Image: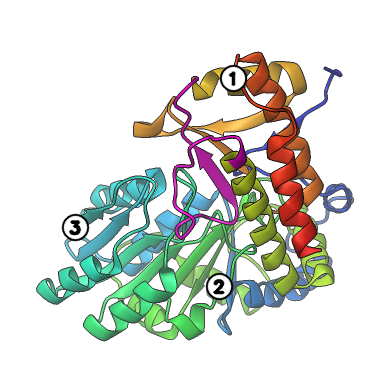
Amino acid sequence: MLPDYQLLRIPGPTPIPPSVQRAMSQPMVGHRSASFQELLSRVAPRLKPLFGTKQDVLILTGSGTLALEAAVVNALDEGEAALVLVTGAFGDRFRKMCQTYGLDTYVIESEWGRAFDVEEVENFLRQHPHIKAVFATYCETSTAVLNPIWELAKVIQQNSDALFIVDAVSCLGAVETKMDEWGIDILVTGSQKALMLPAGLAFAAISEKGWHKVQHNRRPRFYLDLSRYQQSLSDHATPFTPAVSLVMGLEQALNLIEEEGLEQVIKRHQVLKEMTRQAFKALSLPLLTSDKDASPTVTAVRPSQFKADDLRSLLRKKFGLTLAGGQQKLKGEIFRVGHMGYCSPLDVLQTIAAIEVGLKQLGMEIKLGQGTQAAEEVLIHDL
């Protein structure tokens, strides 16, 4: 392996485009300067199409978890009832946050690897009309599940007055997202996934219904007070020191997305998903999720003939290829391949080829090229 050579194929942080890296290397400017105000005025409105909203998109300095926590503390007061849908480790993180802040927390947990059951949620809301907010994860990174957020939004509107709060950290910018049309009240994401930036920025958009609740919520908050961010944004500023270099990089990342076209970006991620899944099927490696529930941004494999972490370790040592492992109850049982953001079909082919070699070295009886051929056939069909 070449020194310093690295192939990062995890579901975040993701590889950074060279032009984004160069943008982040620009000379530093003051965060209260006219030049930064101009930058923020250019960048912030361009986030709206990714969210599918006409509302302002707030820019926070911190990880995606910061935005999740901000959603909890701004939307609900202590003692109010919340329903959390758990389909993996990050849905479980929402549960822990709600409990930490003293919410009356109800949980519907699905088998990890499966999307939530919309009908089960509908029945629960009918039986619990006091629920004030429903929390859900759009793409559950830990299980590679894409949950049917659009269906759930409709069910919530028809059966409840609850706010609908969605974690889209590991898919926004890579999948169709229509916040306003679907009826999402708070939608949050982070910078280090499909937005092709390092970790360090978080984003949140809030509906009119959501803002009404935020502004009347008596819970104390300071750095996480989203009203402060909204007020500052109207002056092309942030209430606290922002990650200036990341905002510079964000402008170039948006340039790349717009140049490719958002519809084409979404289509590309679908192709990457199909290439990856068909390759693993051809290699007879069991996928954790069904085709129906599969995410376009990450694929999870649950091998039965070898240890997932043995393959990950071998690939990292031999090729500098980093795959993600399992989390919590899936730790050591799965490996995950990220294919989002700055990722092309050729990246997937390279990854599958390396995995095939790794499987051979682990003693698996496979035919070299079997997985890459299956992926290539998907690609050829979509060219």
Give the mark nearer the N terminus: 1 vs 2.
2
Q: Is residue 292 left or right of residue 367?
A: left
* Quadrant assignment, res 381: bottom right
Closest to the observer: 241 or 322? 322
**Residue picked out by circle 1:** 364
Q: Quadrant of the N terminus?
A: top right
Give the mark nearer the N terminus: 1 vs 3.
3
Counting other residues with Cα less than 10 Å from the Cα at mark 1, is it few (<14), some (14-19), or many (20 or more)? Answer: some
Q: Give above or below for 201 relative to 128.
A: above
- Is residue 344 in view from this perspective? no
* Distance between mark 1 and mark 3 Cα atoms: 44 Å
Residue type marked 1:
Met
**Residue picked out by circle 2:** 177
* Distance between mark 1 and mark 2 Cα atoms: 40 Å
* Quadrant assignment, res 350: top right
Secondary structure mostly taken by the magenta-highlighted segment of the chain:
loop
- Is residue 144 in view from this perspective? yes
Image coords of residue 380 (percent x, y): 79, 57
